[in-house]
Image (cartoon, rainbow, N blue to C red):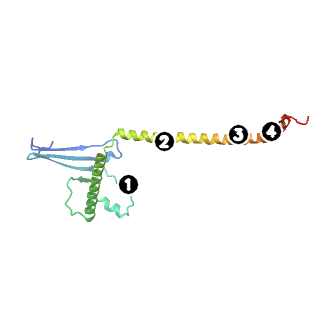
């Protein structure tokens, strides 16, 4: 805690974080300043942080000395301050349009959720009805498969009966002359 801290009114804490196990951890550290202050019945927390470079990182980056970007970047400070407060700026048209699009998407999403909620509650579809309809569909499908199997079996039986009829017709044509001859011989003879 810093010396400016007062019990119950203001607490000021500074800490430094040294990282290990990440690339180039020995090149920088992160310093943070926490300020917790009482504001009537509420408390306000302010957090300030910055990255403190211990060594320069430019030997790691190989840049041409004639490059204007390299010349401009050498003059950068070695401490970067991270502030939770951003300077007040006028919103641009793109920001305004983005906000309008987000509000529109939220409104459409709300309408869709409302419709989904009322659709589900007006139907009152319970699991028993769903299960019964699924069983009916499954039963119709099973019956259709069985009917198709029976149709196939009947088609094969009809084909076999047609083959049997053709074979019997051929057999009858083959034995018909022998039967006629036997009938003629079996008739009583009147000429004797």
Q: Dot 1: within a 10 Å radius of its alpha carbon, few (fewer than 14), some, or many (20 or more) residues?
A: few
* Residue appearing at x 58%, y 42% in the figure: 151
Looking at the picture, does residue 81 appear above or below residue 178?
A: below
Q: Residue beneath label 3, please?
A: 164
Task: Indicate the quadrant where residue 181 lies.
Answer: top right
Asked whether, in this view, residue 2 is left or right of residue 153, the answer is left
* Residue appearing at x 26%, y 59% in the figure: 99
Does the rendering let one see residue 54?
Answer: no
Alpha carbons under labels 3 and 1: distance apart? 94 Å
Of marks 3 and 2, which one's residue comes earlier in the chain? 2
Of marks 3 and 1, which one's residue comes earlier in the chain? 1
Of marks 1 and 2, which one's residue comes earlier in the chain? 1
Q: Residue beneath label 4, please?
A: 175
Cβ atoms under marks 3 and 1 closer than 8 Å: no
Rendering coords of residue 56 (x, y %): 32, 52
Q: Residue beneath label 1, please?
A: 61
Q: Dot 3: within a 10 Å radius of its alpha carbon, few (fewer than 14), some, or many (20 or more) residues?
A: few
Looking at the picture, does residue 186 appear above or below residue 87?
A: above
Q: Nearer the viewer, mark 4 or mark 2?
A: 4
Looking at the picture, does residue 13 appear above or below residue 57?
A: above
Numbered mark located on residue 86 in the image: none
């Amino acid at each position: 805690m810093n010396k400016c801290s007062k019990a119950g009114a203001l607490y000021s804490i500074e800490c430094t974080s040294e990282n290990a196990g990440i690339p180039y951890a020995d090149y920088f550290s992160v310093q943070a300043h926490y300020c917790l202050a009482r504001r009537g019945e509420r408390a306000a927390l302010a957090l300030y942080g910055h990255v403190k470079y211990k060594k320069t990182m430019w030997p790691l980056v190989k840049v041409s000395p004639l490059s204007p970007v390299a010349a401009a970047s050498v003059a950068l400070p070695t401490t970067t301050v991270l502030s939770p407060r951003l300077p007040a700026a006028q919103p641009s048209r793109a920001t305004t349009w983005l906000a309008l699009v987000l509000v529109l998407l939220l409104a459409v999403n709300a309408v869709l959720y409302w419709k989904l909620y009322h659709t589900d509650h007006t139907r009152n579809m319970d699991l028993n009805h769903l299960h019964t309809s699924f069983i009916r569909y499954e039963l119709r499908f099973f019956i259709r498969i069985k009917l198709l199997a029976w149709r196939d079996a009947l088609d094969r039986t009809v084909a076999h009966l047609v083959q049997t009829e053709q074979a019997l017709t051929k057999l009858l044509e083959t034995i018909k002359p022998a039967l006629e001859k036997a009938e003629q011989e079996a008739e009583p003879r009147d000429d004797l």
